[in-house]
Amino acid sequence: MKKILLIAACSLFIVVSKAQTDSAVQTKQKLMITNITTMDGQKINGLLSAVNDSQLVLNKYKGALTVPAENLKSFTLKRKHSVLKGALIGFGVGAAAGIIIGLASGNDPVMAYPSPGEDPLGLGTMAVALNNSFAMTAGEKAVLGGLGLGTTGAIVGTIIGAVAKKKFVIGGKKEKFHDLQADVMLKLVKK
């Protein structure tokens, strides 16, 4: 009965959330960090705010800056906060995997101590005590696995977020900029 109620509640939530969106596609501008190299070798950095047929428009702390297509040698686009997002996603995936693996491996068996008559020197008792001191429950394995794999995932996600960028080479050619304009606009707008 609980499963049926849970499925019904999830289905109702999906229907209500989809019903609240407008029929027109709602778009929002992504924050993209742009590094531009001009034809004369000048480097310009800022947030990309618009792209039109003949220029890129950047938001700088001083105001808007336009760079015409004829002056563009190349530029790169990188999502703002991509390193943080990569680290968080990596941590989440790694932690989930570690928790699942830890819980799936189950509890370690605890060995019984030998009777005093069977182990006169106490070596068996020491071996059992050593083995039992490292025995872990499934919950303990899940915590350690979640932390270990979560940390590893965060490191990998940070590296991926830091190097993920798209480079566009224009070479001062307005035709090439016009051909790449659709790709740039798709990267700038998210649904």
Image: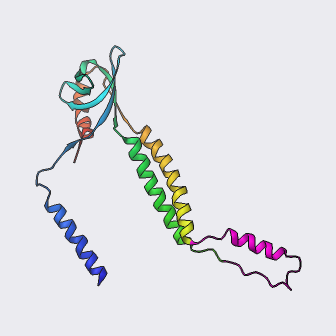
Residue 27 in the image: state x and y as whole percent: 18, 45
Residue 92 in the image: state x and y as whole percent: 43, 56
Residue furthest to the left: 23
Taking the image as shown, residue 187 lies to the left or right of residue 162, namely left
In this view of the protein, which residue sits in the foreground, 38 or 83?
Answer: 83
Residue 162 in the image: state x and y as whole percent: 43, 38
The residue drawn where x is 81% and y is 76% is: 124
Which secondary structure dominates the residues rendered in magenta? Answer: loop
The residue drawn where x is 27% and y is 25% is: 61
Q: Give the answer, above or below, for where 122 lies relative to 76.
A: below
Q: Give the answer, above or below, for where 114 lies relative to 180.
A: below
Q: Is residue 102 magenta?
A: no
Residue 48 in the image: state x and y as whole percent: 26, 31
First to last magenta residue range = 110-137
The residue drawn where x is 89% and y is 76% is: 121
Q: Is residue 113 magenta?
A: yes
